[in-house]
Image: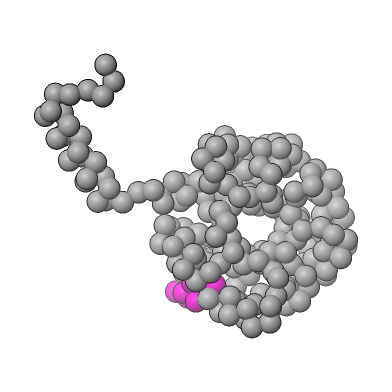
Amino acid sequence: MKFFVDTADVAAIAELHELGMVDGVTTNPSLILKSGRNILEVTREICELVPGPVSAEVVALKAEDMIAEGRKLVEIASNIVVKVPLTWDGLRACKVLTDAGHMVNVTLCFSVNQALIAAKAGATFISPFVGRLDDINIDGMELIADIRQVYDNYDFQTQILAASIRSANHVAECARIGADVMTAPPAVIKALAGHVLTDKGLDQFTKDWAKTGQTILS
């Protein structure tokens, strides 16, 4: 499973990239706002840092305007993925942009039917929002599993990009189900290394080593 990092914080991306934990990046208007930077400037910097797909989202609501914004965004770098919402206008924009050879991430997916028509429209990625479904007491992982089954049934090439990932458990379940990609904030990716028994074992090793009075580096 590929790891995308969901942020526009260049320093955080760079830290994870150095460890090989970043296969791509996803951004959205909220993350751009949080960064406090110009969308074109920060997206260009991210693309220069990360060779994998970098999603940059349109903000228009009408298809023609989404297409125009998408064409502007792909001028930033060759690894730009135009991110469009899962609306009828978004699907129209997806079809035009993919037919022109651009990568498209269709976002805000909450049903199998939405994922199905996004694949029919040629989406490169579909982004089902796991955490937001959990928030309304619907199992987000069931949606990931259902999309996986439907896409496999018909050999759709659209990649499942599990989004709104809130915990290490979400990541493990996505990997178990077979999501192609998951995108998560830097803090969630870092949390994958944590385990209470690792901490407990390390604490015991440290105490025992101190009792030996030895040093490895002299």
Membership of 182 in magenta stretch: no
Question: Which residue of the protein is positioned furthest toward the bottom in this rendering?
Answer: 153
Numbered label tally: 0
Name the residue nearer the viewer: 94 or 173: 173
Question: Which residue of the protein is positioned furthest toward the top in this rendering?
Answer: 218
Name the residue at 86% across, 65% down.
99
Name the residue nearer the viewer: 180 or 46: 180
Location of the N terminus (image quadrant): bottom right
Percent across and percent down for residue 101 are 85, 59
Name the residue nearer the viewer: 113 or 53: 53
- In the visual, does 22 lie left or right of 72? left
Percent across and percent down for residue 14 are 58, 36
Type of secondary structure dominating the magenta stretch: helix
**Residue 12: quadrant of the picture:** top right
- In the visual, does 172 lie left or right of 57? left
Name the residue at 24% across, 41% down.
202
Name the residue at 58% across, 75% down.
148
Position of 134 relative to 103 (above/below): below
- Start-end of magenta stretch: 135-144
Membership of 136 in magenta stretch: yes
Q: Is residue 133 visible?
A: no
Percent across and percent down for residue 152 are 63, 78
Location of the C terminus (image quadrant): top left
